[in-house]
Amino acid sequence: MAIRERLGFTAAEPAPVYGEPFETADGAIVITVARRGVVSPVMRPAGVFVVRDGAATWVPAVDINRIALMGELIGLLAAVITSLAILRRPPWPDLGRHSGD
């Protein structure tokens, strides 16, 4: 059984790419992890494994620009939906009984 099958990777999911481990000044070993895009071969950082005193911890890489872009897009979408709701409001609030003279 191949390692990809043991880890549960399918053909549609690209395997993570591990960098060369290096040791920091305080004795921790850092292993970088990146993932390849599904459509494009561009590598995106996923995070790092930090091995210190025999215990490994995962530190994910956070893309602040992507989070900010999603916030801006959600705000823009909310503004467009609100504008459309105001401009194309239904006519029935204006309908009412008018007493004849």
Image: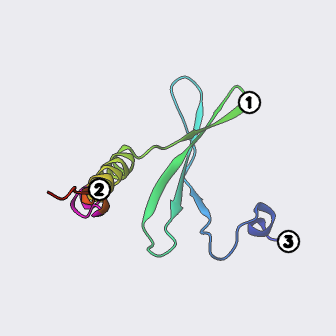
Q: Which residues are magenta?
A: 83-91
The residue identified by callout 1 is: 54
Where residue 74 appears, as percent x and y from the top left, is 36, 52
Q: Which residue does the image show at 28% across and 57% down from the upper left?
A: 96
> Which of disc 2 and disc 3 is earlier in sequence?
3
Q: Amino acid at mark 3?
A: Met
Nearer to the camera, 95 or 32: 95
> Which of disc 1 and disc 2 is earlier in sequence?
1
Where residue 60 appears, as percent x and y from the top left, is 54, 42
**Residue furthest out toward the front:** 101
Query: Badge 2 local density, few (<14 within 10 Å), some, or many (20+)?
Result: few
Give residue 54's quadrant in the image: top right
Element carrying mark 1? loop
Nearer to the camera, 41 or 28: 41
Element carrying mark 2? helix
Q: Amino acid at mark 1?
A: Gly
Does residue 50 appear left or right of residue 87 in this picture? right
Does residue 35 appear left or right of residue 78 in this picture? right
Where residue 77 appears, as percent x and y from the top left, is 32, 57
Q: Which residue does the image show at 60% across and 60% down from the upper left?
A: 16
The residue identified by callout 3 is: 1
Alpha-carbon distance for marks 3 and 2? 68 Å
